[in-house]
């Protein structure tokens, strides 16, 4: 019996033309991909790759098998949904993976909505960072849909077996201690804030790289006094007047007393929030859940369109 995991791996190997590149996309080692392809060759009884010391060449049989497997894998993905329709009275369980700030600021309103109750489903949730959520989705054992974010300079990637839907672009805004904002405009140029101490993301992360790029385009190097990838911690440090911070609008929706939000007139950086699902065919129930998140996120994305387009740093992301 052919292993569906090996068939998916075959598709990635043909797309990227090497075991190493496919392994990088799938989160495997190159050795594991090679072993999977060797097992697949044993199962089908034909050679799928001509191997040399430094390269591989797929045989015609590999291309035929990959073409056939596209339909087979789609049908396998559809089987649970087909079975579930036999008994419409039983709620379907949906496994949701979601990143922390969306779980805190977006998910409660989605679950409280009338539209969610109409979906007639039970929900199990995994809260984790985007790269971990993609691994869970590929594993196919815990989640059916994941919400992830990415900045333009993100290394986040996923294989072509996953479907991606852009839910919104989440603009970056500035958080200031209230005492620092008293004599400042509501939409000051970002450069006017460069002399302040700043709180940034951890060095080497896509968030930190994007923020560094923003300041580079301003030809400024602000003083970073603290770093954190936990936006709740960052917000509390702002309230304590440790520094100012660039954060996504999603995080700035419910700031505590003592923190104010400023939207610099020349800042148009954002992060992308996406929903990822498995398979090439859409799942109506998962699409409905994606629609709910898109609707809840729409006001956040709209705030990006409201800003002056005079200066743009060209960033997108989460």
Image (cartoon, helix red, strand yellow):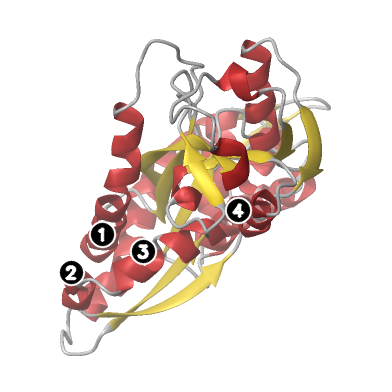
Crowding at mark 4 (Cα within 10 Å: few <14, some 14-19, many 20+): many
N-terminal-most mark, 3 or 2: 3
In this rendering, which labeled residue sits more in front, label 3 or label 1?
1
N-terminal-most mark, 2 or 4: 4
N-terminal-most mark, 3 or 4: 4
**What label does residue 120 carry, if any?**
none
Distance from Cα at disc 3 to Cα at disc 4: 18 Å
Q: Which residue position holds label 3? A: 76
Residue at the spot 33% in from the left edge and 55% down from the top edge: 74
Mark 4 and mark 1 residues within 8 Å of each other at the beta carbon:
no
**What label does residue 115 carry, if any?**
2
Q: Is residue 68 left or right of residue 212?
A: left
Nearest the camera: 115 or 285?
A: 115
Crowding at mark 2 (Cα within 10 Å: few <14, some 14-19, many 20+): some
Q: Where is residue 197 in the image (x, y as percent from the top left)?
A: 75, 34
**135 w.r.t. 303: above or below:** below
Residue at the spot 29% in from the left edge and 28% down from the top edge: 306
Distance from Cα at disc 3 to Cα at disc 2: 28 Å
Q: In this view, does 307 lie to the left or right of 16?
A: left
Q: Where is residue 157 in the image (x, y as percent from the top left)?
A: 57, 39
Callout 3: helix, strand or loop?
helix
N-terminal-most mark, 2 or 1: 2
Callout 2: helix, strand or loop?
helix
Residue at the spot 52% in from the left edge and 18% down from the top edge: 189
Nearest the camera: 227 or 77?
A: 227
N-terminal-most mark, 3 or 1: 3
């Amino acid at each position: 019996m052919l292993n569906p995991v090996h068939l998916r791996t075959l598709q990635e190997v043909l797309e990227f033309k090497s075991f190493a590149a496919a392994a990088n996309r799938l989160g495997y080692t190159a050795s594991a991909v090679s072993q999977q392809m060797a097992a697949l060759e044993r199962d089908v009884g034909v050679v799928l790759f001509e191997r040399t010391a430094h390269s591989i060449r797929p045989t015609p049989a590999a291309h035929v098998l990959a073409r056939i497997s596209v339909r087979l894998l789609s049908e396998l993905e559809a089987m649970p949904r087909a079975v579930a329709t036999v008994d419409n009275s039983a709620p379907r369980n949906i496994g949701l993976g979601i990143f922390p700030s969306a779980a805190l600021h977006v998910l409660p309103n989605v679950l409280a909505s009338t539209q969610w109750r109409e979906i007639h489903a039970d929900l199990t949730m995994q809260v984790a960072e985007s790269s971990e959520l993609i691994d869970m989705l590929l594993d196919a054992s815990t989640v059916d849909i994941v919400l992830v974010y990415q900045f333009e300079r993100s290394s986040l990637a996923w294989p072509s077996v996953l479907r991606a839907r852009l839910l919104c672009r989440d603009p970056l805004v500035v958080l200031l201690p209230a005492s620092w904002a008293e004599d400042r405009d509501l939409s000051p140029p970002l450069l006017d804030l460069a002399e302040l101490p700043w709180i940034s993301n951890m060095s080497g992360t896509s968030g930190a790289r994007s923020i560094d790029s923003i300041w580079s385009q301003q030809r400024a190097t602000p003083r970073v006094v603290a770093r954190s990838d936990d936006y709740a911690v960052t917000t509390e440090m702002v309230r304590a007047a440790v520094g100012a911070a660039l954060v996504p609008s999603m995080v700035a929706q419910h700031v505590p007393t003592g923190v104010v939000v400023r939207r610099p007139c020349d800042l148009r950086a954002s992060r992308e929030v996406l929903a990822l699902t498995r398979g090439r065919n859409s799942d109506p129930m998962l699409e409905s859940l994606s629609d709910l998140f898109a609707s809840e996120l729409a006001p956040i994305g709209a705030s990006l369109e409201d800003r002056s387009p005079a200066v743009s740093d060209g960033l997108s992301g989460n």
